[in-house]
Image: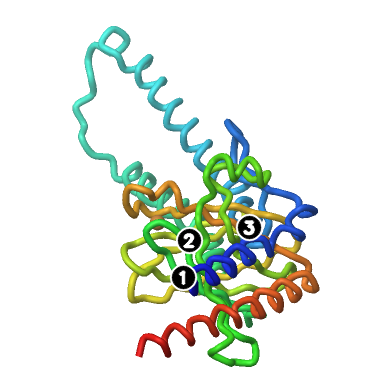
Amino acid sequence: MRFGSKLAVGLVLALIALPAFADLPQHVPQDKAFGFQPPATEVARQIQAFHNNWLLPIISVILAFVTGLLLYIFVRFNRKANPEPAQFSHNTLIEVVWTLIPVLILVVIAVPSFRLLYLEDEIPEADLTVKAIGAQWYWDYEYTDPAGDPDKTITYSSILLEKEDAIAAGKPWLLGVDSPMVVPAGKIVRVIVTAADVLHAFAVPAFGVKIDAVPGRLNEIWFKVDEPGIYYGQCSELCGSRHAYMPIEVHVLPQADYDAWFAKTQAEYATYHALDGVKLASAK
Ligand SMILES: [Cu+2]
């Protein structure tokens, strides 16, 4: 009976996100697409700019230079063209040059790279903190009460939708879940990431976010998404046989819609907590 009531609460909870879901743009990675997913945060924009406008040109020039050098050597110094090879084995000038130039290249890469790392690492004052707990093989999301009431904490599991259910819900199979993570748009969201059993990793490519979920340890990341929408990620640390089946679905809602979702979910959970209380009391 009590289990039945809990199930009913669970079903209601699963439906909560649906009204907002209908009018949110879905950002789904495309089959055979090339390059990164479109960035949804400043961090993701800067990561992609660092790759596309800085690293890629540098490695392209290096690749062209080394390939050209090899081709030149094949032609100029093969046995036919150069039957009598020179016998010297050292050249101080060229050894200094081929040590210094790579060091300078690394410095030129390192400076913007460290700037970017600090942008990712330094968490600005957060408007909202969500705890994401990796488990074999789903994610739990925990929201504390803004007023600090521990009895009003929301915790729920986010589980992969079966293929038919995903299609029926209009979500991509293997990315869609029953109860997504929900956050407000334009706000700084801090995610505390940990794991319940083995290593997992919380990764949402469009946010430029990827961090290990380690049992017994709290890691932190942050993102600020301006465009409301639905974004997808995946567990990115091999965590067992169903590693591929614990995706991350994030609904970014306008603040008012987020507030409504939170109030409604909290109210539903009040019932859930009350049921828990009844269960604990009757177990004594
Ligand atoms: Cu995992």
Examine the rendered structure and indicate whether residue 46 appears above or below residue 143. Answer: above
Say what amino acid the circle numbered 1 marks: Val
Q: Based on the displayed image, in which of its 4 quarters is residue 5 positioned?
A: bottom right
Left or right: 236, with 250 as reference point: left
Is tag 2's residue or tag 1's residue first in the polypeptide sequence?
A: 1
In the rendered image, the residue lying farthest to the front is 1
Q: Are the two marked residues, 2 and 1, in contact with CB atoms closer than 8 angstroms?
A: yes
Residue under label 1: 193
Say what amino acid the circle numbered 3 marks: Gln
On the rendering, which quadrant does ligand 1 occupy? Answer: bottom left
Q: Based on the displayed image, in which of its 4 quarters is residue 214 positioned?
A: bottom left
Q: Secondary structure at mark 3?
A: helix
Say what amino acid the circle numbered 2 marks: Phe
Residue in front for this viewpoint, 42 or 220: 220
Is tag 2's residue or tag 3's residue first in the polypeptide sequence?
A: 3
Residue under label 2: 202
| For discs 2 and 3, the disc positioned in front in the rendered view | 2
Residue in front for this viewpoint, 202 or 170: 170
Q: Secondary structure at mark 2?
A: strand
